């Protein structure tokens, strides 16, 4: 994990408490990603004064990535499958967010 302090905080304060309260594992994962998405959106939107939900959507699109990666790793029994899957999805989501940000800053992405 590239961001272990955040990962550990989310696991300790969001994911495991959900499990202890009887939340199903997949629902706990979605809740943890939802909280992370809200925090990411706040970290981007507040300083940039751009409330477009791009960071939120980018984080929430990682939920299917986790499910797809787990499926592929179980099917092919290879740790490399997950790494390739992550790189492909990460590249596409990063590129889309950068393009959307540039359009917004140039005033061409206003849908308001």
Image (spheres, helix red, strand yellow):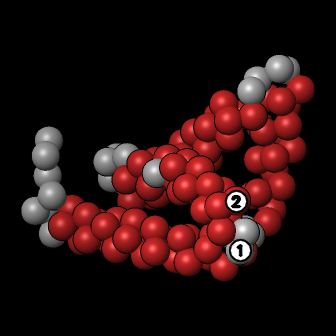
Identify the residue at image location x=26%, y=71%: 99
Image position, residue 89 (x, y; %): 46, 68
Q: Is residue 66 something one can see in this rendering? A: no
Helix, strand or loop at label 2? It is helix
Q: Position of residue 5 (x, y in %)?
A: 81, 62
Q: How many marks?
A: 2
Q: What element does badge 1 sit on? A: loop
Disc 1 target residue: 78
Q: Please determine whether, in this image, residue 93 is positioned above or below residue 28.
A: below
Give the residue drawn at x 66%, y 79%: 80
Distance CA(mark 2)–CA(mark 1): 8 Å
In this view of the protein, which residue sits in the foreground, 70 or 18?
70
Residue 10 pos. (x, y %): 76, 47
**For the residue carrying disc 1, how many other residues have a C-alpha within 10 Å: few (<14), some (14-19), or many (20+)?**
few
| Placement of the N terminus among the 4 image quadrants | bottom right
Whether label 2 touches label 1, CB < 8 Å: no
Residue at x 72%, y 69% (from the top left corner): 77
Quadrant position of residue 112: top left
Kindly give the residue lying farthest to the left in the view shown.
108
Residue 74: numbered disc: 2
Q: Is residue 15 above or below residue 108?
A: above
Residue at 34 percent across and 65 percent down: it is 97
Can residue 47 be seen here? The reply is yes
């Amino acid at each position: 994990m590239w961001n272990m302090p955040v990962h550990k905080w989310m696991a300790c304060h969001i994911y495991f408490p959900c499990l202890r309260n009887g939340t199903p594992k997949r629902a706990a994962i979605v809740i943890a990603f939802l909280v992370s998405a809200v925090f990411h959106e706040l970290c981007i939107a507040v300083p940039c004064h751009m409330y477009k939900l791009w960071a939120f959507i980018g984080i929430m699109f990682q939920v299917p990535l986790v499910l797809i990666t787990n499926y592929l790793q179980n099917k092919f029994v290879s740790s490399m499958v997950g790494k390739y899957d992550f790189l492909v999805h990460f590249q596409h989501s990063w590129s889309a967010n950068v393009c959307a940000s540039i359009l917004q800053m140039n005033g061409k992405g206003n849908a308001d």
